[in-house]
Every structure is written in C-alpha cells, then in structure tokens.
Amino acid sequence: MTTGSYYREEARRCRVRAAREPHSVSRSRWLQFAAEYEELADELEQAQPSRPLINRLMQLQESQQHRTKEGSREQGSHEPNTA
C-alpha cells in the first residue's frame, strides 16, 4: 500500500511545477493537486482511506497524466520545423 510520504512527495512535486508554471490557471491547478495529495497523505496516516478518497485519488492521477501529455504536446508544437 502507498504511504503518506509518497503522497507528500507528489505534493512537493506539484508545488515545484506550480512555481515554474507561467499561466495562472495552470499554476492554480498544480497547487490544487498539491493540496489534494497532502489531504490524501493526512488521511492515509490517520486511518484507512475511504472509498470516496480512493476514487478522488484515481481522478487526480488521471488528471495529472492528461495534463502531462498536453504539456508534452504543447512543447513539441513550439519546436522549429527543421525539415
């Protein structure tokens, strides 16, 4: 089972991404991810997670994966065409 420290590290990574994000909407979203990861860590450290918490975790991870894929596409679209 995943520990609270894992989610605290994920929260830290999200805060780092937020600090580097130039767009305020994206920065807010990364900070929201961080807060949710911290909440997950707190709940894991206090007791077994509830079903709604597990569902929220799955949604958070899916959102983060989608956001990472979008960022990769955006970075690729700004590359100069060398062909």
Image: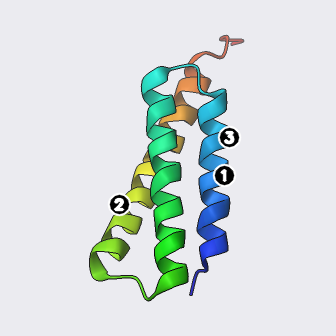
Pointer 2 residue? 59
Secondary element at image label 1 = helix
Q: How is the image coloured?
A: rainbow
CB contact under 8 Å: marks 1 and 3: yes
Q: Quadrant of the C terminus?
A: top right
Q: Position of residue 77 (x, y in %)?
A: 55, 20
Q: Amino acid at mark 1?
A: Arg
Q: Looking at the image, is 80 positioned above or below residue 42?
A: above
Extreme residue toward the front, this view: 46
Circle 2 crowding by C-alpha within 10 Å: few under 14, some 14–19, many from 20:
few
Which of pointers 2 and 3 indicates the residue nearer the eye? 3
Name the image quarter holding residue 48.
Answer: bottom left
Q: Which mark is residue 12?
A: 1
Mark 1 or mark 2: whose residue is earlier in sequence: 1
Residue 79 vs residue 21, the one in the foreground: 21
Q: Position of residue 58 (x, y in %)?
A: 39, 67
Q: Which mark is residue 16?
A: 3
Q: Amino acid at mark 2?
A: Gln
**Gap between marks 2 and 3 measured at Cα:** 21 Å
Circle 1 crowding by C-alpha within 10 Å: few under 14, some 14–19, many from 20:
some
Which of pointers 1 and 2 indicates the residue nearer the eye? 1
**Horizontal placement of 5 versus 57: left or right?**
right
